[in-house]
Image: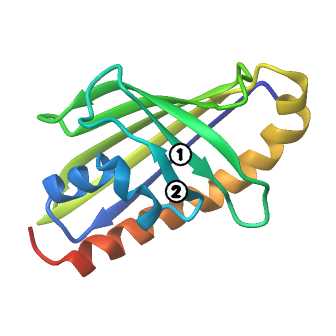
């Protein structure tokens, strides 16, 4: 396995701007993404080219450090894309893209991921495991994100 590709979407009962603001608030990632244990480093302001570092710890899996770099931050189109790589220097990486649109008085959030496995350990072991994890984690995170937005109330 050299690549993994996936997508997930969810209708959210919140304004598109509130959804986009939550997605792009790096400090709040652990609130709605169960695989993220904590944010280790974050930029003072999110902008193209900046990086942040998190500690990943999906359930029943060892933890690791992940470094992400913003590739696109289009607040007008509500599009956010970034590349993530493991903190151990492995050349494998993941491209994430989020897009939020208006939908029936609420918002629709769409996320895609493209994982590029560059080493044998990632291709034969890590990749197949991560493919199964992402298939569960991303939809669960979207549901948790929607819950966090509802709990926060109207914005």
Q: What secondary structure is marked by label 1?
A: strand
Q: Position of residue 15 (x, y in %)?
A: 14, 61
Mark 2 and mark 1 lie on one chain; the one further toward the N terminus is 2
Residue 95 position (above or below residue 103): above
Cα–Cα gap, marks 2 and 1: 6 Å
Residue nearest the observer in this picture, 105 or 143:
143
Quadrant where the C terminus sits is: bottom left
> Which labelled disc corresponds to residue 83?
none
Task: Tell me what residue is drawn at x 28 percent, y 66 percent.
Answer: 12
Q: What colour scheme has been applied to the protein in the rendered image? A: rainbow
Judge from the rendering whether residue 67 lies leftward or rightward of residue 91; answer left or right. left
Task: Tell me what residue is drawn at x 65 percent, y 32 percent.
Answer: 87
Residue 115 position (above or below residue 6): above
Image label count: 2
Task: Tell me what residue is drawn at x 32 percent, y 51 percent.
Answer: 23
> Which labelled disc corresponds to residue 54?
1
Judge from the rendering whether residue 4 lies leftward or rightward of residue 38; answer left or right. right
Q: Position of residue 126 (x, y in %)?
A: 82, 40
Q: Are marks 2 and 1 in contact (CB under 8 Å)?
A: yes
Disc 2 crowd, CA 10 A, few/some/many (<14, 14-19, 20+): some
| Residue 4, quarter of the rendered image | top right
What residue does disc 2 label? 38
| Residue 107, quarter of the rendered image | bottom left
Quadrant where the N terminus sits is: top right
Q: What secondary structure is marked by label 2?
A: strand
Task: Tell me what residue is drawn at x 36 percent, y 53 percent.
Answer: 27
Q: Position of residue 144 (x, y in %)?
A: 43, 71
Residue 155 position (above or below residue 133): below
Judge from the rendering whether residue 26 lies leftward or rightward of residue 3; answer left or right. left
Residue nearest the observer in this picture, 102 or 24:
24
Residue 37 position (above or below residue 52): below
Judge from the rendering whether residue 17 lies leftward or rightward of residue 50; answer left or right. left
């Amino acid at each position: 396995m050299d690549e993994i590709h996936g997508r997930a979407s969810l209708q959210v009962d919140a304004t598109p701007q509130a959804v986009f603001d939550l997605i792009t608030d790096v400090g709040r990632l652990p609130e709605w993404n169960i695989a993220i244990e904590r944010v280790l480093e974050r930029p003072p302001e999110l902008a193209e080219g900046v990086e942040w570092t998190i500690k990943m710890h999906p359930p029943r899996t060892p933890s690791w450090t992940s470094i992400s770099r913003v590739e696109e931050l289009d607040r007008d189109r509500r599009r956010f894309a970034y590349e993530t790589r493991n903190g151990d220097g492995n050349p494998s990486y993941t491209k994430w893209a989020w897009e939020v649109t208006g939908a029936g008085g609420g918002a629709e959030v769409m996320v895609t991921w493209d994982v590029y496995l560059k080493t044998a350990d990632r291709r034969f072991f890590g990749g197949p495991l991560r493919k199964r994890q992402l298939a569960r984690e991303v939809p669960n995170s979207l549901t948790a994100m929607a819950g966090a937005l509802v709990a926060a109330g109207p914005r």
